[in-house]
Amino acid sequence: MKKNLVLPLVGLLLILLSTSCQKIDTGTSQQEVVALQSIPLKYGQLKAVTMTEQYPGWAQLWFQDEAGTICMVRVDWVKHEMMKEPLTITRTPASTERTKP
């Protein structure tokens, strides 16, 4: 009797495990990755390097140019690759008007 229950239970367990799996988004699927050869000087001076557990093997290099524009370059230091397009954040002068609470 027990042998008759083991096989269906194993089958059910395998079905449940296969349907509960999800693909993990590494953040690289939507952007093109290129070989890490050089980082353009136009990005400015390197200001910081950060890493996050969410993307193991990747580091974010933060640059700032003379105009204050911030540029973040994502680098895979394990595979020696980088995202083709950096994240660019422009800076604008602060507004003289204050928002009312």
Image: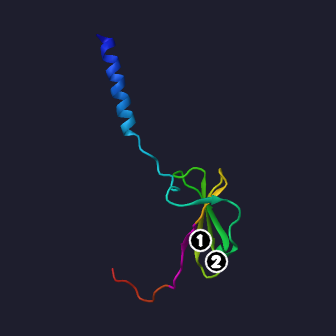
Q: Residue at x 31, y 12 (%)?
A: 2
Residue 94 position (above or below residue 22): below
For the stretch drawn in magenta, what is the main secondary structure? loop
Compared across the picture, whether 36 is left or right of 85 comes to right
Residue 54: % across, % down: 51, 52
Q: Are marks 1 and 2 in contact (CB under 8 Å)?
A: yes
Q: Which residue is mark 1?
A: 71
Disc tally is 2
- Element assignment for label 1: strand
- Could you tell which of marks 1 and 2 lies nearer the N-terminus? 2
Q: Residue at x 38, y 29 (%)?
A: 14
Residue 93: % across, % down: 51, 85
Q: Which residue is mark 2?
A: 65
Q: Which residues are magenta?
A: 85-93
Residue with the most extreme top position: 1
Q: Find residue 96 and name its label.
A: none
Compared across the picture, whether 47 is left or right of 90 comes to right
Q: Residue at x 58, y 77 (%)?
A: 69
**In terms of image quadrants, where is residue 43?**
bottom right
